Image (tube, rainbow, N blue to C red):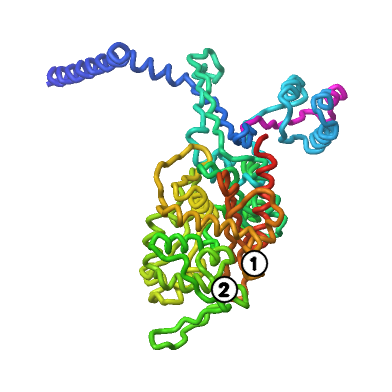
Amino acid sequence: MKSKRFDLFFILFLAAMVFFVYRLYGYQVKNNEKYVQQVENMSLRSIKTLSTRGSILDRYSTPLAWDAPIYTVRKKVVFLADDLKRTVINGFEDRDRAESFIRRLEMYGSIETDLPVVLADRLKEYPELEVSERIIRYYIENPGLAHVLGYLRGDGEAVMGVEKQYNDLLTGTPGEKVIRVDSRGNTVAVESESSPLPGDNVMLTIDAQLSMFAYDRLLATGKNGAAVVMKTNGEVLALVSVPSFNNNLFSRRISDRDWLRMNLDPSTPLINRAITPFSPGSVIKPFIAMVALAEGYDPSIEVICGGSFQYKNTSGEVQGIYRDWFLYGHGVTGLSKAITVSCNVYFYQLGLELEIETMNVYGKKWGIFEPTGIDLPGEGTGLLPSPAWKKEKTGEGWFPGDTILTSIGQGYLSITPLQLARMTAEIAIRGAEVLPFICRERSSERVVIDLNEESWDLMINAMKDVISKGGAAAESGTAYTAFRNFQWPVAGKTGTAEQGGSLPTHSWFTGFTPVEDPEIVVSVFVQDGGYGSGLASEVSRDIMEFYYENRNR
């Protein structure tokens, strides 16, 4: 019996030994390479080397956004030695800045600041200092470019503008260093190393000086607003929104206080008004006129403008009285004069004759109220209302009064300053399609607004007369006063947009220059600019003058 138990025990022992030897063989021989590789991998470390982001440049190669180091300097001693102070003073071009650096370092012990690279390298040699650096994004001090450029957050995420639109292009490829470390984490060898590749630079069509001028001129009105300056081939020279913000606040990790202040600001500085829709008022009348001409309407048909229009139903009952902006009326008025003097009474009747459905047909065909497709994120779009739209949004039917108001750019109708600039450019070059862009060129061979030459002559001459003086107040162009004695030929259209109730009106102007061989379009919107379009017209004149005086630099 004992012999049998011994035999069983021996067999089990032998099986266990065989299994142990087999496993040992697997670890030491069969899978040796696998486990050796795992151990080696455990001793390797990968270190990423950040790449620099590409710069953003204006059309003249002026840097608008770029990467540069910022340094954290910490002192390890109580007092700074005199020779170190001399090094700092000699390292700055501005002595006041050097003394400020010394004073802040002695006071706080550690400061983050930008330094000349040569000085930063010198300071690293002093054992009593600890100098570290990181790369941050810098932006030109030009609030006229803030919305176009956008910004990088402190965590590197691109927000708004060109930074977001061309993020993939601007972002470089990080480098990598693979090192071998010992059990204590000390580097014993560099296994491989690849250098970081910087991102590509992006050159814009934007003119930084023109943008700054347009911003300052708009700011001088004391109102919010927007200005678009665009070549007739679609190159955007300026896309300005007021109020603005400082992009540099974000790249250095904006404080909670600044972020809250900016977001709670009732003037909404982060909104790009150049691509935001607003009620346009009379600057939309050229669109209504083109619809009429496309429909074969006789522009020589005249109406009598006595200062108001009475809308009557089929029974002859007065349903509403709609007034002209000019109390005494414009007298006998045809289409050309109606554009020049901005006769509301004429367009009330023209709109009723065309009907809202016809306006929508051409609005869609010509794309006037569709997004321009500019290479910027967040573009808003205007609205040409329709009976179906109103029913869906309000639950109400469409009334003749809605058509009357739409015909003069009031009611539900809206457009962005950029969309208005595109429409104006397409008028300037007689219907050819204009595709706005700020970086990647877009061109088109298509004629989008198909009118005959006689109709184009009428449109352009009528808009040219907007700038000229007639024989009486009722005959003068609505922008005559603003452009008086202006030495370059301009064609344009003014607009005053009511917001309803006691709210102040918006002021608009859109125009192109020169008239015969158009180069640029300027569209200006002054929010709450007050009655009359004088503010927007005056800003537009000054922008055009700046363009002419500086275009050959």
Q: Earlier in the sequence, mark 2 or mark 1?
A: 2
Residue 266 rendering spot, x and y as whole percentages = 63, 61
Label annotation for residue 500: 2
Q: Looking at the rendering, which quadrant does residue 236 occupy?
A: top right
Secondary structure of the residue carrying numbered label 2? loop
**Looking at the picture, which amino acid does disc 2 mark?**
Gly
State the quadrant of the C terminus: top right
Look at the picture and state if 432 lies above or below 350: above
Look at the picture and state if 52 lies above or below 490: above
**Looking at the picture, which amino acid does disc 1 mark?**
Gly
Binning the other alpha carbons within 10 Å of mark 1 as few (below 14), some (14 to 19) or many (20 upward) gives: some
Q: Is residue 256 left or right of residue 461?
A: right
At 64% across and 40% down in the image, what residue appears?
208
Give the magenta range: 66-86
Q: Nearer the viewer, residue 428 or 275?
A: 428
Q: Could you tell me how far apart the alpha carbons at marks 2 and 1 are, in whole angstroms?
A: 15 Å
Q: Are marks 2 and 1 in contact (CB under 8 Å)?
A: no
Label annotation for residue 376: none
Residue 355 rendering spot, x and y as whole percentages = 39, 70
Q: Looking at the rendering, which quadrant does residue 202 occupy?
A: top right
Residue 184 rendering spot, x and y as whole percentages = 55, 19
Let me know if residue 249 appears in the view. Answer: no
State the quadrant of the N terminus: top left
Label annotation for residue 532: 1
As drawn, the residue found furthest toward the top would be 29
Query: Which label lies toward us, 2 or 1?
Result: 1
